Image (cartoon, rainbow, N blue to C red):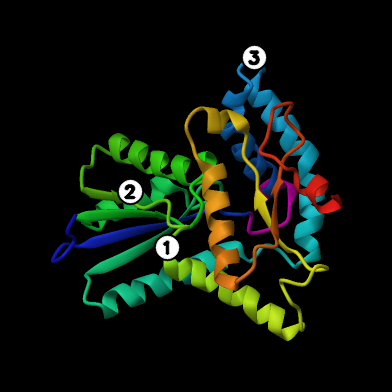
């Protein structure tokens, strides 16, 4: 698709996190996350369970936020969106970016509506997740399409996903690791050293339904390791324990101990 000469809008979609480490902000945030995956347990009272899960998880998450002085994610996401707009305009595009979040305000629908009001002709949805997962990239793009339908708006639409294999991204990740290795005088091929990738897990049901997140993880970790010139690496998944369902393996804690 060509966007030359058209007013371009780019939705830069991130996860979103509470601006303040309070139960008033953290519990609704967690509830939205749990509700999104509620379909994985169709026999339960989904709303009530999501609220219970959010209420139980909130104190621990609030404590973690307070330890780091609050989450920096939203500010970083907004700055990233602003820089992208600057770069696009420098390349001659009539472009405006819109920083949107899946689980906190401003939500995706709000920013799609804003882009419509601005007269955008080509709308690009860019979830910032490099690995295409069902509850992140896929859901974010579905939310954009839902908003377009609800607003009865049909601009030229481009959804971006699956960019973990892009050479520049692999080089960036490998470059950061290489710098760390040099600064700490490490050798990735030393028998006592292992390059360890810890990755967010996903329910096996999503993989059974066709999402290939597990394959994307394998591809990306292999590419980074090869770029660094080592075959000595391991991968573990950060899985949730609040749902009695199967998750990607090996589990992070088990793999680290092994």
The label number, if any, that marks residue 43 in the structure image: 3
Left or right, 22 with reference to 143: right
Left or right, 184 with reference to 17: right
The front one of 166 and 8 is 166
List the single residue furthest toward the left. Answer: 5
Magenta: main secondary structure equals loop
**Which residue range is magenta in the image?**
18-25
Q: Name the residue: 40% across, 48% down.
A: 110
Q: Name the residue: 50% across, 72% down.
A: 171
The label number, if any, that marks residue 64 in the structure image: none
Residue 121 position within the rendered picture, expressed as x and y whole percent measured from the top left: 19, 55
The label number, if any, that marks residue 113 in the structure image: 2
Please tell me in which quadrant of the rendered image residue 154 appears. Answer: top left
User: Which circle's residue, 3 or 1, is located before the other in the chain?
Assistant: 3
The front one of 224 and 27 is 224
Residue 173 position within the rendered picture, expressed as x and y whole percent measured from the top left: 56, 69
The residues bearing labels 2 and 3 have C-alpha atoms spaced at a distance of 35 Å
Left or right, 164 with reference to 236: left
Mark 2 vs mark 3, foreground winner is: 3
Q: Which residue is mark 1?
A: 166
């Amino acid at each position: 698709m060509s966007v030359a000469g058209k007013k371009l809008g780019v939705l830069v979609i991130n996860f979103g996190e509470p601006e303040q480490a309070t139960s008033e902000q953290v519990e609704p945030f967690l509830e939205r996350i749990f509700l999104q995956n509620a379909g994985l347990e169709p026999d339960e009272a989904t709303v009530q369970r999501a609220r219970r899960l959010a209420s139980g998880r909130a104190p621990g998450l609030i404590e973690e936020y307070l330890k780091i002085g609050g989450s920096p994610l939203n500010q970083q996401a907004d700055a990233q969106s602003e820089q992208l707009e600057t770069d696009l305009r420098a390349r001659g595009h009539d472009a405006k970016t819109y920083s949107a979040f899946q689980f906190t305000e401003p939500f995706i629908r709000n920013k799609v509506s804003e882009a419509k009001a601005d007269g955008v002709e080509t709308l690009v949805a860019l979830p910032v997740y490099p690995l295409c997962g069902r509850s992140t990239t896929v859901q974010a793009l579905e939310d954009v399409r839902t908003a377009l339908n609800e607003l009865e708006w049909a601009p030229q639409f481009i959804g971006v996903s699956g960019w973990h294999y892009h050479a520049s991204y692999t080089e960036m990740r490998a470059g950061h690791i290489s710098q760390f290795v040099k600064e700490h005088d490490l050798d990735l091929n030393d028998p006592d050293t292992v390059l360890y990738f810890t990755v967010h897990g996903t329910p096996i049901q999503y993989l059974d339904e066709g999402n290939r997140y597990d394959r994307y993880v394998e591809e990306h970790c292999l590419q980074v390791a090869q770029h660094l010139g080592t075959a000595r690496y391991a991968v573990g998944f950060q899985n949730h324990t609040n749902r009695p369902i199967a998750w990607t393996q090996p589990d992070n804690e088990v793999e680290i101990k092994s």
